[in-house]
Image (cartoon, rainbow, N blue to C red):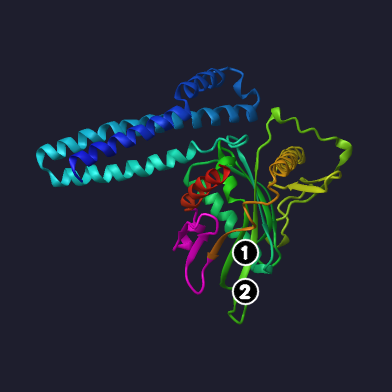
Amino acid sequence: MAVVDISEELKSLSSTMGSIEAVLDLDSLRADIAVLEEQAAAPSLWDDPEAAQKITSKLSHLQAEVRKTEALRGRIDDLGIMFELAEDEGDADALGEAEAELESVRKALDEMEVRTLLSGEYDAREALVTIRAEAGGVDAADFAEKLQRMYLRWAERHNYKTEVYETAYAEEAGIKSTTFAVEVPYAYGTLSVEQGTHRLVRISPFDNQGRRQTSFAGVEVLPVVEQTDHIEIDESELRVDVYRSSGPGGQGVNTTDSAVRLTHLATGIVVSCQNERSQIQNKASAMNVLQAKLLERRRQEEQAKMNALKGDGGNSWGNQMRSYVLHPYQMVKDLRTEFEMGNPEAVFGGEIDGFIEAGIRWRKQNEK
């Protein structure tokens, strides 16, 4: 690449970085960090472990975000020196290193740019993810479990904390449903593009005739409710059932009735929590999930009113959003963005950042 081209490229990268820094508002982030550091230093911090966990988690996330932004700015500034030295010394190896760093910086800048597109009302929230087996029998239950593992491994790859609230196991294999939290800021904005119906096509390992089977699983992503949301639930509108937690194959994992199922009588919404804690803790977790579902219901009702005013009664998301094909060829393809990968095993192993980034960009374009 010519020196002039490199100069223009670096100017473009620097300009893009400047736009990202302006959107992120680093001064505001640093101010938030200062407030959180003061709260984290309070002697009484751990008197309320749950509140302390939220403070330290948010502090850690904001600090990492500022460090990441500052480090990328430093890498962009250093690129000019790397190319200049390589050019002056006529060092082919140094030039190759500079070009590799340039490509790496481009990729990191693209990833950071996606973060600036998360500007929705609830995008900064943590996320509650529910996966349900749909049509396809035992294959659908197995597929739902694969999706649960996929998202949990994705979170693990990013060092995001997760907590599984409830998993209902199917009789033969897989799961009927599961609900888990991804406890990191912007988890909702990031994962909300995963919501919809996922389809799996493969030779069924459960069919003794080796026939091809198509199965479906639904993914729902909700923002975690905060105190400012004012979702009031009248206890008289709740039916509370307690029962013993169970594991795969119906095997009991608790000897007491610690699992809790809540039924919201006014809406018919049912949620449950059985993650092996006390009944009181399970009820509190189930209430959090119920509040999130009621918040999403309210948001959808408000959105429906806005769509009616705009004359847009359709759902731009459609129903099926991603196809995982294992036979007769290997391909995972997003049906909205056209983004695809030819390695389903890697996708099920949590390599879904490309799909998420493409989905966020697609959503932003369709908002215009």
Per the image, the residue denoted by label 1 is: 142
Give the image location of residue 178, x and y in percent.
67, 52
Task: Specify whether 7 is left or right of 205.
Answer: left
| Residue that sits furthest to the right in the current view | 236
The quarter of the image holding the C terminus is top right
Dot 1 or dot 2, earlier in sequence: 1
Q: Is residue 330 magenta?
A: yes
Give the image location of residue 50, x and y in percent.
64, 30
Give the image location of residue 318, x and y in percent.
63, 56
Residue type at mark 1: give it. Answer: Asp
| Residue that sits furthest to the bottom in the current view | 209
Report the residue at 73% width, 44% height from top: 308
Task: Please name whichever residue, 274 or 302, is drawn nearer the observer in this view of the structure.
Answer: 302
Residue 190 lies in quadrant: top right
- Position of 159 relative to 143 (above/below): above
- Position of 96 relative to 211 (above/below): above
Report the residue at 43% width, 38% height from top: 112
Residue stretch rendered in magenta on the structure: 325-350
Per the image, the residue denoted by label 2 is: 206
Task: Specify whether 342 is left or right of 132.
Answer: left
Task: Please name whichever residue, 25 or 137, is drawn nearer the observer in this view of the structure.
Answer: 25
